[in-house]
Every structure is written in structure tokens, then in C-alpha cells.
Amino acid sequence: MNVRPLLVCALLVFAACTPRNIPGTQIADTEDNRAIINVMERFRAALEARDAKALQELVSKSFRDNAGTEDPSDDLTYDNLPQALPALFARIDSPRVTMDIRKVDVKQNGVATVIYYWNATWRAPGLLDKPQRDSELEQMVLQKEDGKWRIVTGF
């Protein structure tokens, strides 16, 4: 008995059942994952464009970020973003940001975490002569509100 055709059929069935990934990633191709990656790309583009209004449109009204410090005076919230972001963007030139999204984890409660690695370069005229560079592995938390994913924390 020739078992090759049975083996080929079994492999085809198994391959058809495996989840598909978004091209170029190891992230499952789902509607939510695509929408979250779209938010991340809009976030990246708004940073490069120094577009405070576009960033404001991406965040939840419950947005809060401690800016990586314990000092509450530099915390960002939904309410202070319209003042804080233009002041920050006024101090930098030529920001360039790349992101490598490593993992998207969507929970049943409408909250998602995104693990991403980012590289950023920028100039700070009047403060520093050389271009600045930073890169880190980060986590962003998003929440689905009225059918749209919004950033809760993780700037």
C-alpha cells in the first residue's frame, strides 16, 4: 500500500489549519491585530511628523504615561497632551522612528498589549551638537473604545 498520498493529504490539512501571519511578522493575521498595527504605524508617523494633534487622536481619554520616571510633574495624560507635545516637538528636529512589532496580545476584555522594539534619531538644536539616538524594547497598552483601538499607555 502506498502511504505517500495519505501523508501528503494529512500535511495539506495540517497546513490549512495553521494560523496565517501578517506578512513580514510572526503576528497572527486577525482583524484586531491589523487594526492595532495600523495604530502603531500612525503613532510612528505622527512622531516623525511632530504632529501633536494626530497623536492626541490615537489616545484614550484614560491615557496616562509616566514618561519612564517617578516624577509626576512630567507625566502625560489625555488632558495635558495638547500642551506637552507641542512643547516637546519644538525642542527637536528631524525625528526618525522605526518600529519592529514583536508581539500583539489581545485579551477578551478589549485590552491589548504590544511589545515593540523602536529606534529613534533626532536633533536637539541649541541643546546638543550631535544627532541623538535611542532604542529600546517597549510595551504599549491599547483599549478598544467604540470599535477603535486607542492607546492607554506606553508612549
Image (tube, rainbow, N blue to C red):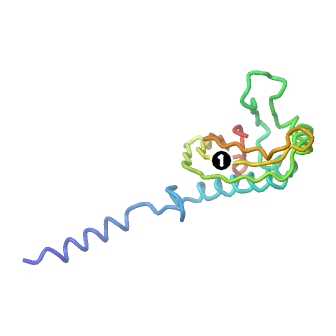
117 lies above or below 66: below
Total marks in image = 1
Residue drawn where x is 65% and y is 47% of the image: 118
Q: Quadrant for residue 37, please give it.
A: bottom right
Viewer-side residue, 143 vs 116:
116
The image quadrant where one finds the N terminus is bottom left
- In this rendering, the answer to whether 138 lies above or below 4 is above
Quadrant for the C terminus in the image: top right
Q: In this view, does 94 lie above or below 90?
A: below
Counting other residues with Cα less than 10 Å from the Cα at mark 1, is it few (<14), some (14-19), or many (20 or more)?
Answer: some
Left or right? Give the position of 90 relative to 150.
right
Q: Residue 73 appears in which quarter of the rendering?
A: top right
The amino acid pointed to by label 1 is Trp
Picture residue at 71% right of the left edge, 30% below the top: 68
List x then y, in percent, for residue 79. 87, 35
Q: Mark 1 points at which residue?
A: 118
Lateral position of residue 21 relative to residue 71, left or right? left
Placement of 17 over or under 88, stated as above or below: below
Left or right: where 101 falls relative to 145: left
In front here: 141 or 115?
115
Residue at the front extreme of this rendering = 129
Front-most of residues 140 and 112: 140
- Percent coordinates x, y for residue 150 in the rendering: 72, 46
State the residue at coordinates (67%, 48%): 119
Which residue is located at x 37 percent, y 68 percent?
A: 16
Residue with the most extreme top position: 71
Which quadrant would residue 71 be assigned to in this image?
top right
Instruction: Check disc 1 and report its element: helix, strand or loop.
Output: strand
Place of residue 95 in the rendered image (x, y in percent of width and height, measured from the top left): 80, 51
Q: How far across and how far down the image is residue 102, in percent?
A: 55, 49
